[in-house]
Image (cartoon, helix red, strand yellow):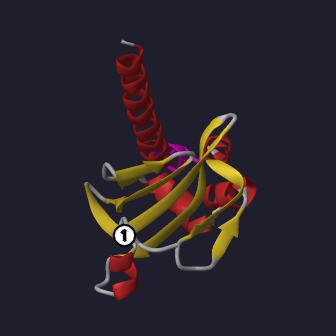
Amino acid sequence: MSAELAGLERRLRAIEDELAVQRLVAGYGPAVDTRSRERVAAMWSEDGEYDFGAGALVGPEQVAALVDLEEHAAWVARGCAHVLAPPVVHVDGDRATAIGYSRVYVRDGDHWTVVRVSANRWEFERTPDGWRVLSRMNRPLDGSPEARRLLELDQPE
């Protein structure tokens, strides 16, 4: 019976870990669309980075400062949504990887325009305070091999 319980405990922990990582990814859009520096910063590890093609931002404060960029603030004022598709998640102990798509919609009169569709690769670490982002790389799906490579879950590190 104890072997069965141990197996159930491992399976439950794996499910909880995957769900926690999915929630982090899903929470990114609402955090940036409400311009919540605190919520964005809380997602990243101390040395975590975000590379969206214009150079890497390192640390929670630099990443959170994205919400104050002029273009981002203008989008929020017009009405925008950063929408992330449910990611494919792989958990390996205290590390996890997630891959998936993101879209940014911006209101244009009485409709919304998709201004960016991207491939995303996230790396996470388990900390005493829960899962945190170690890195996120985001590239527009413009046909480039670099963007497609981000979607390979078993990509070598």
Q: Residue at x 64, y 73 (%)?
A: 56
Please, which residue is most extreme toward the bottom here? 144
Q: Which residue is mark 1?
A: 118
Q: Is residue 102 magenta?
A: no
Q: Position of residue 22 (x, y in %)?
A: 41, 43
Q: Which residues are magenta?
A: 30-35
Residue at 40% x, 84% y: name it: 146
Residue 157 in picture, x, y percent from top left? 52, 72
- Classify mark 1: helix, strand or loop: strand
- The front one of 111 and 150 is 150
Residue at (31%, 52%) from the top-left corner?
85
Front-lying residue, 40 or 23: 23
Residue 98 falls in image quadrant: bottom left
- 133 on left or right of 22: right
Judge left or right: residue 3 versus residue 36: left
> Relative to residue 133, is residue 6 depicted above or below?
above
Q: Nearer the viewer, residue 75 or 18?
A: 18
Provide residue 100's location: percent of width, then percent of height.
34, 60
Q: Residues within 10 Å of mark 1 (few under 14, many from 20)?
A: many
Dot 1 amino acid type: Ser
